[in-house]
Image: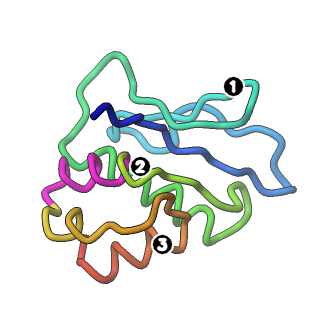
Amino acid sequence: MFNVFRIMKVILSTMCTSLVGMLERGLGYHLEHRKNGFFSKRNQRGSVPPDGHWRFIVLCAELAQNGLYISDIQVSREEMKRAIYEAGGYIAMQNLRLDTYNARDVLNLKTTFGL
């Protein structure tokens, strides 16, 4: 069966009109604007650390918790599985049940499983 791999969508706060580019050096991901919103994207050049994808998702979730630039994120279960697997969180990966995860869900997983 073919799984559709959706990328993380970032929902900006009302105080922010645009947020693109690298959020933190060395993670291997950045935000890009598309006609239907802002989304994460893996950098085509350079290396990505094994936990870079997961750390980027967590960074966006933490920014959403602050609420200044990002109000929330939407991450599919498949993307969460890949990111957590790459970061070595095998037990956490096996416990993903939701179809879509928001910022609060991501931070809860991080705390619960010590990721």
Coordinates of residue 98 in the picture (x, y in percent): 44, 66
Judging from the image, what secondary structure is the residue with disc 3 in? helix
Q: Amino acid at mark 1?
A: Arg
Name which residue lies at 28% across and 21% down.
46
- For the residue pair 38 and 2, the one nearer the viewer reads as 2
Q: What predominant SS class does the magenta segment belong to?
A: helix
Q: Amino acid at mark 3?
A: Asp
Q: Is residue 85 magenta?
A: yes
CA distance separating discs 1 and 2: 19 Å
Which sits earlier in the primary sequence, circle 1 or circle 2? 1
Q: Amino acid at mark 2?
A: Phe
- For the residue pair 79 and 59, the one nearer the viewer reads as 79
Judging from the image, what secondary structure is the residue with disc 2 in? helix
CA distance separating discs 3 and 2: 15 Å
**In the visual, does 88 lie left or right of 1?**
left
Q: Quadrant of the N terminus?
A: top left
Q: Which residue is mark 3?
A: 105
**In the visual, does 28 lie left or right of 48?**
right
Q: Which residues are magenta?
A: 79-88
Q: Which residue is mark 1?
A: 34
Coordinates of residue 13 in the picture (x, y in percent): 78, 57
**In the visual, does 82 lie left or right of 35?**
left
